Amino acid sequence: MTVTLHIDNTVRDYDDWKAAFDQYERFRADNGVRAYRVGRLDGAQARVLIDLDFDDRAAAEAFRTALATVLATPRSRAMVISHEALLVDLVDERVSPLIGAPGAPGGQPNS
């Protein structure tokens, strides 16, 4: 089962925040993050949504605890205006069967 730690941050400056986020690649890997996605809301570029995927709930909860330590640093407090972290259990995932099918966008041309 995949568990996602969904983080909703509002940051002062995205570029500064992203540079700091990138410096924690090893921290994420060492703490069980299997994959992540970073997005920004259209019309609210300071709002950053991060999904961190874990193999199980225990790893996600442990990471959330470790993340609280990082967020308590003066550097993080200066960058992050607001922060919310929610655990989400993946209950269904599907890849469209049409992706790559003949005639579908990105698929094989019809003959």
Image (tube, grey):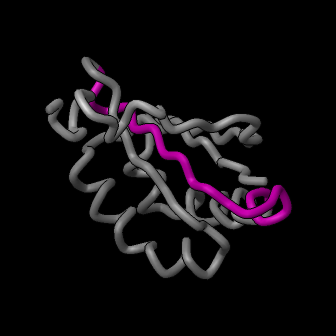
Q: What residue is shown at x 73% (from left), y 50% (from top)?
A: 3
Give the quarter of the image for residue 18: bottom left
Question: Observer-nearest residue: 96 or 78?
Answer: 96
**66 lies left or right of 83:** right
Magenta segment: does it hold 59?
Answer: yes
**What percent of the width, then of the height, locates residue 28?**
55, 71
- Image quadrant holding the N terminus, namely bottom right
Q: What residue is shown at x 63% (from left), y 61% (from top)?
A: 67
Question: Observer-nearest residue: 1 or 10?
Answer: 1
**90 lies left or right of 50:** right
**84 lies left or right of 88:** left
Question: Observer-nearest residue: 34 or 7?
Answer: 34
Q: What residue is shown at x 24% (from left), y 39% (from top)?
A: 107
**What percent of the width, then of the height, locates residue 91?**
76, 36
Magenta segment: does it hold 18?
Answer: no
Depicted 28 relative to depicted 48: above or below: below
Report the span colored magenta.
44-61
**What percent of the width, then of the height, locates residue 62?**
78, 65
